[in-house]
Image (tube, rainbow, N blue to C red):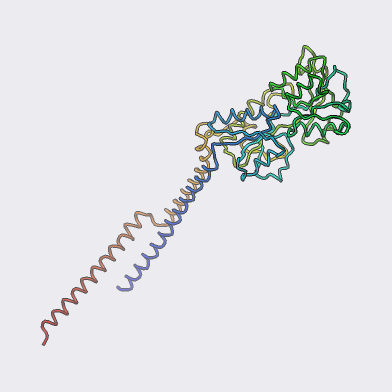
């Protein structure tokens, strides 16, 4: 009898230990799920910071597209002017920066190995770098004819200034033999019109409002576009740029400006993002960029842009949308935070259900454990304690009775 009691108690102890371990595992799994949810919720911030070069009107157009898309989705957007020589991609990569820049627009070459946490939302447009010179069509045969003249190459921190100086050097025009002026686009254009400059570089965007004043210059008989011979060889020297054709009459069909097709250097404009950016924001921006820059213009066919980048890893959601135009239902119907949490919650919930199913199959069911093992065990312990107390009382009473009936 004693051995049976000892065996039963040992089994109860084993079951009790197993139950504690099982409930501990489930509790840890639940805490882990809640921790994952908290981390993702913190990362999916509704405040996004965009940095761009405000000296380039074409880049500002892209920034405005991003702002419109994010505003419509309910995100709070802050913008900063990249007014110095810092590379925007470095700001997006560096999460320790107080500004925590999540998005940027760049027209500079990027080495992806230096920025492992930066992804591309695509090349949204390629715009020509043009040179407008004083004098009618035919005044210049190439940029080499600008030697010795006053040339507006762009503001100090601008992309056009860097490219313009390298482009001129390829044709033998340098700061030693010419005057390179560095003014903002509007000022440069005014100085060109006033005769205080002989030529000016322009990053021309067919969609930009600035192209109206550029059109007025090109249409005028007092100004003309400077041809660029050997653009393919030039593109190879400049790197990161492409070659395209500015068609005859691009600025005006009636005025026949330009008078002939022109081979031009095209500068890619790329939107970059930190890899931890909200997926809801990515889909919102991809939709806006495709709508705003996917239309045809004098330089691009319908649907030509946005294009996937070849020098940065492309964000998978943006790439998928450009290919299929499909947005998962949760990003269409749910608020951004819930949409971003939907997949992690589904995965975490599945893991939790699997653990619970394994528990139910391999371990005792909680109610049965309580009613069949734990509660009877407690009841037996109470009964044993009560029996011991009764036995002690009986012994005391018996001892007291023996004392009273002594010799």
Disc count in the image?
Answer: 0
Which is more toward the observer, 150 or 323? 150
Percent from the top left, x then y, of residue 10? 37, 68
Percent from the top left, x then y, of residue 153? 79, 29
State which quadrant residue 103 falls in: top right
State which quadrant residue 379 falls in: bottom left
Percent from the top left, x then y, of residue 157? 73, 34
Q: Quadrant of the C terminus?
A: bottom left
Residue 384 drawn above or below residue 189 = below
- Residue at figure coordinates x 44%, y 51% from the top left: 356
Residue 259 drawn above or below residue 163 = above
Q: Quadrant of the N terminus?
A: bottom left
Residue 400 appears in the rendering: yes
Direction bottom: furthest residue: 407
Query: In screen coordinates, is 3 left or right of 177?
Result: left
Direction top: furthest residue: 254
Residue 296 appears in the rendering: no
Which is more toward the observer, 12 or 98? 98
Percent from the top left, x then y, of residue 46? 54, 36
């Amino acid at each position: 009898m004693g051995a049976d009691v000892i065996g039963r108690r040992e089994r109860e102890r084993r079951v009790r230990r197993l139950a504690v371990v099982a409930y501990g595992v489930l509790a840890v799994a639940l805490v882990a799920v809640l921790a994952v949810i908290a981390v993702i919720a913190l990362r999916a911030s509704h405040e996004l910071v965009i940095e761009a070069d405000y000296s380039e009107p074409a880049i500002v157009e892209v920034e405005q597209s991003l702002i419109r898309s994010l505003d419509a989705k309910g995100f709070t957007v802050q913008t900063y002017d990249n007014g110095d020589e810092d590379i925007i991609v470095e700001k997006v990569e560096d999460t320790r920066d107080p500004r925590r820049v999540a998005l940027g627009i760049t027209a500079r070459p990027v080495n992806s190995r230096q920025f492992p946490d930066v992804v591309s939302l695509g090349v949204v447009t390629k715009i020509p770098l043009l040179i407008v010179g004083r004098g009618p069509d035919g005044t210049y045969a190439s940029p080499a004819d600008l030697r010795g003249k006053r040339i507006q190459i762009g503001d100090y921190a601008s992309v056009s200034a860097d490219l313009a100086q390298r482009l001129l050097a390829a044709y033998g025009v340098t700061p030693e033999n010419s005057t390179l002026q560095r003014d903002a686009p509007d000022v440069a254009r005014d100085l060109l019109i006033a005769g205080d400059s002989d030529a000016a570089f322009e990053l021309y965007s067919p969609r930009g409002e600035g192209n109206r004043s550029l059109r007025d210059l090109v249409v005028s008989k007092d100004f003309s576009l400077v041809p660029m011979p050997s653009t393919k060889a030039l593109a190879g020297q400049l790197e990161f740029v492409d070659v395209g054709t500015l068609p005859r009459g691009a600025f005006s069909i009636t005025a026949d400006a330009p008078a002939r097709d022109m081979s031009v250097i095209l500068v890619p404009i790329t939107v970059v993002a930190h890899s931890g950016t909200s997926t809801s924001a990515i889909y919102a921006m991809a939709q806006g960029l495709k709508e705003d820059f996917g239309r045809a213009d004098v330089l691009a066919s319908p649907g030509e842009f946005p294009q996937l980048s070849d020098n940065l890893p492309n964000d998978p959601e943006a790439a998928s949308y450009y290919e299929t135009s499909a947005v998962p239902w949760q990003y269409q119907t749910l608020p951004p935070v819930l949409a971003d949490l939907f997949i992690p919650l589904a995965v975490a919930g599945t893991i939790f259900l699997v653990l619970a199913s394994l528990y139910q199959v391999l371990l005792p069911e909680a109610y049965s454990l309580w009613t069949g093992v734990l509660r009877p065990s407690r009841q037996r312990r109470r009964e044993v304690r009560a029996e011991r107390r009764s036995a002690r009382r009986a012994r005391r009473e018996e001892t007291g009775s023996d004392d009273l009936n002594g010799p």
